[in-house]
């Protein structure tokens, strides 16, 4: 037992106090400090890159979790973690569109009316909503009467957080029920092929197609729509739009977004900078992208600031920059490399390296996993922060999204999140060398040039 336990807990308490006050100051600057009983989103909820807030929350959540795990009886902690039905209740509320139903009822709706509107038994729905209200999503304003609050109201803004919740609680959670079976199955256990993931195992008796999750999605227009929309929410929730203001895009003219999805990031980029963007993705997704741009930003199509180039990034390189005036080819990979095991990820990078000009850069935007126990005094790499003592150097639960996303990638694709060293190694296999890391608190931009 540590003799300086008291000192360490006092230090954690001080970190909690300081980081909470720093977070309050950020809210104060942006329209006022929120109350636990707020019913509307705060202006800062939709800010694209609240970096300072995220840096404070990373310390606050990490320190609170360490303090709770130290002081609570272990059996209590293990039981509450094992009984984490929270995600399943979120899935029910989102799929039943409860936040939407409550939107025009600020005083709340009784559970019988909610049951009628969702076609559910009132008693069952009440258990779901009570569980969520106990963790600050929805508010039980009087017994059996539920209203939206700031968190549930955030599920119905144009940031598509509701669809993000649906993607993670439906597609990504379903395979966890047979995850262990896949980990010990003779055919699946030791394979890192994309089509031998825990997700592939979970659908092997029901889906007759071949390939992994993305191949499956191409034949599922409704689920593909949720996926495309959820990526907008993911960009926001991971703060990845910080890449728009956190990188000197004005130095560049052309951006090929490989595995662009519907091109929501590229659209924001094209609105903020005079860049010409090329979207690369599988053919059905590129069709969805064309519709999305025609609806949202037709001027970019009319002025040829966007082109839609269907491709398979394992089979073909991205479009080489054929306009010789544009000497810098910016090839942006966003949230893509983590979907793939090392062999495939290297192949994607090699294809791009083969068409790079000397000034071209490859930017990988991803979480960078930190070694949980690096020696103090040694950073994980240029631009990667370490947590203050006595926190775990990787911020522990303050960075839990990174480790959760690592598990999501493993379950869905046999992919993974990587440490900086692992990403640099992938790059070097593809003939690239690291130029710079841009730490955006949640994600990082890892910038490569030709070796
Ligand atoms: C996680 S999503 C990321 C989308 C977008 N970059 C973003 O950050 O919102 C991965 C994308 O890779 C695309 N993709 C998967 N396999 C592909 C392949 N073989 N060739 C091209 N695109 C592919 C998917 O269709 C999907 O749009």
Image (cartoon, rainbow, N blue to C red):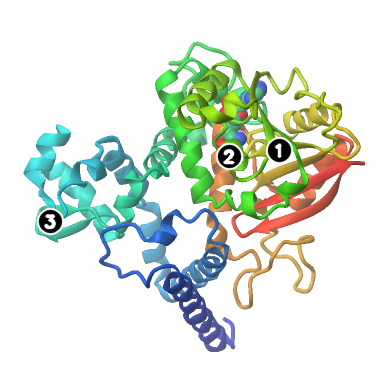
Residue 355 spot, x, y in % from top left = 85, 27
The residue that appears at 25% across and 57% down in the rendered structure is 133
Between the residue at mark 3 and the residue at mark 1, the CA separation in whole angstroms equals: 46 Å
In this rendering, would 57 be left or right of 441?
Answer: left
* SS under mark 2: helix
Location of residue 119 (image quadrant): top left
For marks 2 and 1, the one nearer the N-term is 2
Q: Nearer the viewer, residue 242 or 61?
A: 242
Location of residue 334 (image quadrant): top right
Between the residue at mark 2 and the residue at mark 1, the CA separation in whole angstroms equals: 10 Å
The residue that appears at 59% across and 66% down in the rendered structure is 395
Question: Badge 3 is on which residue?
Answer: 107
Q: Which quadrant contains ligand 1?
A: top right
Asked whether the residues under the numbered discs 2 and 1 touch, taking CB atoms below 8 Å apart as contact, a structural biologist would say yes
**Quarter of the picture holding the C terminus:** top right
* SS under mark 1: strand
Asked whether the residues under the numbered discs 3 and 2 touch, taking CB atoms below 8 Å apart as contact, a structural biologist would say no
Q: Is residue 111 visible?
A: yes
Residue 293 spot, x, y in % from top left = 52, 28
For marks 3 and 2, the one nearer the N-term is 3
Question: Badge 1 is on which residue?
Answer: 332
**Quarter of the picture holding the N terminus:** bottom right
Q: Residues within 10 Å of mark 1 (few under 14, many from 20)?
A: many
Which of the two discs, 3 and 2, sits closer to the camera?
A: 2
Question: Badge 2 is on which residue?
Answer: 265
Q: Quick check: 59 above or below 308?
A: below
Q: Quick check: 404 above or below 91?
A: below
């Amino acid at each position: 037992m540590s003799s300086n336990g008291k000192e360490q807990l006092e230090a954690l308490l001080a970190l909690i106090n300081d980081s909470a006050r720093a977070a309050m100051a950020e809210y104060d600057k942006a329209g006022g400090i929120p109350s636990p009983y707020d019913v509307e989103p705060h202006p800062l909820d939709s800010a694209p890159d609240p970096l300072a807030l995220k840096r404070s929350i990373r310390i606050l959540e990490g320190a609170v979790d360490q303090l709770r795990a130290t002081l609570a009886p272990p059996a209590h902690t293990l039981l509450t973690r094992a009984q984490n039905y929270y995600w399943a209740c979120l899935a029910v509320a989102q799929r039943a569109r409860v936040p939407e139903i409550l939107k025009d009822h600020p005083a709340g709706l009784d559970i019988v009316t909610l049951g009628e509107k969702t076609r559910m038994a009132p008693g069952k729905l009440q258990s779901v909503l009570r569980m969520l209200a106990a963790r600050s999503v929805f508010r039980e304003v009087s017994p059996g009467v539920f209203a939206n609050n700031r968190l549930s109201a955030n599920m119905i803004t144009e940031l598509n957080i509701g669809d993000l919740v649906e993607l993670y609680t439906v597609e990504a959670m379903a395979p966890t029920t047979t995850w262990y079976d896949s980990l010990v199955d003779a055919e699946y256990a030791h394979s890192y092929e994309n089509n031998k993931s825990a997700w592939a195992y979970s659908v092997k008796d029901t889906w007759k197609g071949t390939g992994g999750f993305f191949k499956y999605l191409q034949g599922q227009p409704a689920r593909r729509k949720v996926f495309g929309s959820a990526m907008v929410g993911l960009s926001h929730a991971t703060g990845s739009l910080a890449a728009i203001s956190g990188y000197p895009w004005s130095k560049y003219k052309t951006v090929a977004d490989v595995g662009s999805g519907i091109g929501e990031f590229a659209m924001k980029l094209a609105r903020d900078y005079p860049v010409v963007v090329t979207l690369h993705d599988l053919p059905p997704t590129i069709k969805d992208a064309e519709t999305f741009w025609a609806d949202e930003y037709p001027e970019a199509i009319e002025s040829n600031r966007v082109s839609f180039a269907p491709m398979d990034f394992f089979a073909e390189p991205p479009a080489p920059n054929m306009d010789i005036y544009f000497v810098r080819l910016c090839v942006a990979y966003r949230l893509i490399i983590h979907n793939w095991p090392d062999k495939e990820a290297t192949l994607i990078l090699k294809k791009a390296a083969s068409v790079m000009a000397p000034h071209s850069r490859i930017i990988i935007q991803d979480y960078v996993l930190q070694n949980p126990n690096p020696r103090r005094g040694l950073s994980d790499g240029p631009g990667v922060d370490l947590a203050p003592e006595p926190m775990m150097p990787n911020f522990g639960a303050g960075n839990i999204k990174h480790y959760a996303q690592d598990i999501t990638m493993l379950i869905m694709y046999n992919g993974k999140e990587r440490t900086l060293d692992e990403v640099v190694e992938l790059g070097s296999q593809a003939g690239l060398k690291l130029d710079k890391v841009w730490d955006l608190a949640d994600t990082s931009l890892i910038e490569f040039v030709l070796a």
